[in-house]
Image (cartoon, rainbow, N blue to C red):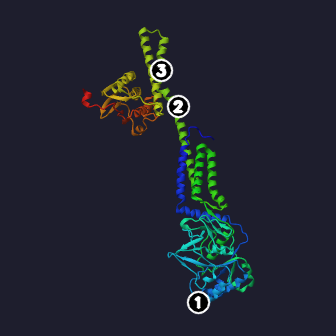
Amino acid sequence: MPKPASRPILPYYLIAALCLAFALIAGWTPLAGRIDNYHYDWTLRLYPPAEPALESAILEIDDLTLLKYGGARNLRRTLALALDKLAPARPRAVAIDLILAEESGKDQDQTLAAAMSRIPNLVLSSDLVPNADQWEEPYPLFRPAAKAVGHVHADPDRYDGISREVQLEKAGNRVRRWALALEAFRLAHGARDIIESDADLKIGGIRIPVPRRGNRGRPMFIRYRGRPIPRVSIRQLLEEPGSARKLTGKVVFVGVTSQSQARDRLMTPVSTITPMPGVEIHAHIYETIAQKEYLWPASNVSIVLACLMLAMVTATVFAFLTGWQAYGVGAIQILWAHSLPHLLFQSGIIFPLLAPAASAWLSVICCAAWQYSVTRKQLSKSEADRSRYQQAIHFVSHEMRSPLTAIQGSSELMSRYNLSEEKRRQIAQMINSESKRLARMIQAFLDVERLGEGQMELKREPFSARDVIIVCLERARPLAEKKRIQLDAGELSPEELLGDRELMEYAVYNLITNAVKYSPPETQVLVTASRKGDRLHLAVRDQGIGMDEKELKRIGTKFYRTRGAEKSGEAGTGIGLSIVHQIVEHHGGRMEVSSAPGRGSCFTIIVPLHAAKPAAEVKG
């Protein structure tokens, strides 16, 4: 449905902008980081990489190997035996994920060094000592046999300790090391050096799109496989001659997988209960590079633009559509926000979930709430307009009944009876007076309605409050005489008011006639006007039945009939008194009512004076 011409659209964009700001701020909080990490892990498991022929394999030191070959104390001799068995299988490269930094025994060390020398492409490990900025390097006896030394330093996520990415380069004490898997990849592909730029790394003719990210170095997300990397234990290699064929032509990662000895186990996105050994993580890093299955984090600019698009489209939808159409498109926006990270992940882009989802949810909910409130307000206005129309009908039937009855009765007298010229003249004058009063009454009602709607400005001219009271008393006197009620004027201050005389005259006349209508016969209605400070207090006091506190709270409400009106049989609607309230308020004043059952009522109009004059000047 097209937008109504009168409906403003700017509030929707302001609301969407506020929602966007809140979503972006929330998207960079630690809680958002955890949520985005969990979503990334789930997405990584949901969309596993293809399973081509893998280039790597793991030669593991498991519990059975340690149990049978002397445990950790005889580890280097066991490793030497394994390398001697592995050399004839001609692996493309061998990366040992063990920090062989200390001397273990002359015989064992020499035996292991000799076995290492028979491996063509050997990569040894080094680690950056925490808080020391020092490298834990291989024992000098082993260093000549290695073609490269790679770092095995792990940087788990700061929010949850899960290993999702690896630093391809790490520096400490002015020495930089490439990652163990990257050095193994270089040697396996026969490259002499790693050529680096700010945007990527190049090994031979292979480009690795890993840009430098300031102090973070070159982080690369690890594309963990859906199935485990093939493994062969050292026990199998030594006892089963055919098992060496599984390592032929592979890049072999050698490391400890024993539950009791492996100290570098880490949780990964594909781990369920048991952490993954570090040697297996290095194999996954290698396969990420070898299979070119890179993942790039989305830039902050793209995240902001996506959230901005979601928020602004939502604002446009709710600004120009209503009802089920707006809600339907809003639901599509939310679905799109949740689908966007999945769609981009399949293209290798890691996009956060919380920021776009929060932007979509907040903007849809807030814009929908605003539209609902605007619709309710418009409905309330329509109901108020309809109620005002009905009140106008009641006003015509109630307030205008008296002058219409007088005019009708007088015209019938003139047409039916042969009246004297003097009598005809009196009746004609009365008809003329009542018709003018009716016209003023209609004009006053219309003026009050326009004032309430803000379509008319109040007249700003000085007039005498005393003159208004005298005119209203004379006009209401015939009604009072008919009920044998005495109309008296008490103290009438000669002050001037500033405003609309006709409207104020209507207000005073309404209070006087109400006092007469709802007072019993043989009573008095007293009208006074006195100055108090810079305000005039105009009071109309009667000796009627009075009102209790419950009635006083509802007095002035349209269509409310007081107990006195019901007992007197007057067909009052309460419209006239509500109009009096509006007139007084538009003159910058207020109306007070004091009453008690059996003691009558006093209606007091309190309005500011035209100009505050000294009391002596007024009396003079």
Query: Front-most of 315 and 170?
Result: 170
Observer-side mark, 3 or 1, equals 1
> Does any portion of residue 143 appear in the rendered image?
yes
Circle nearer the N terminus (3, 1): 1
Task: Judge the density around disc 3: few (<14), some (14-19), many (≥20) Cα neighbours within 10 Å.
Answer: few
Residue drawn at the location 36% of the way across and 25% of the way down? 468
Count of numbered tags:
3
Does 237 appear above or below 388?
Answer: below
Observer-side mark, 3 or 2, equals 2
Q: Identify the secondary structure beneath mark 3.
A: helix
Q: CA distance from mark 3 to mark 2?
A: 23 Å
Task: Judge the density around disc 2: few (<14), some (14-19), many (≥20) Cα neighbours within 10 Å.
Answer: few
Query: Front-most of 11 and 116?
Result: 116
Q: Position of residue 196 (x, y in %)?
A: 61, 68
**Quadrant of res 273:** bottom right
Q: CA distance from mark 3 to mark 1?
A: 128 Å
Does 79 appear above or below 453?
Answer: below
- Asked if the residue at tag 2 contacts the one at tag 3, i.e. Cβ–Cβ closer than 8 Å, the answer is no
Q: What residue is shown with label 1?
A: 105
Circle nearer the N terminus (3, 2): 2
Q: Is residue 493 left or right of residue 192?
A: left
Q: Amino acid at mark 3?
A: Thr
Task: Judge the density around disc 1: few (<14), some (14-19), many (≥20) Cα neighbours within 10 Å.
Answer: few
- Asked if the residue at tag 1 contacts the one at tag 3, i.e. Cβ–Cβ closer than 8 Å, the answer is no
- Asked if the residue at tag 2 contacts the one at tag 1, i.e. Cβ–Cβ closer than 8 Å, the answer is no
Observer-side mark, 1 or 2, equals 1
Q: Is residue 251 left or right of residue 527?
A: right
Q: Identify the secondary structure beneath mark 1.
A: loop
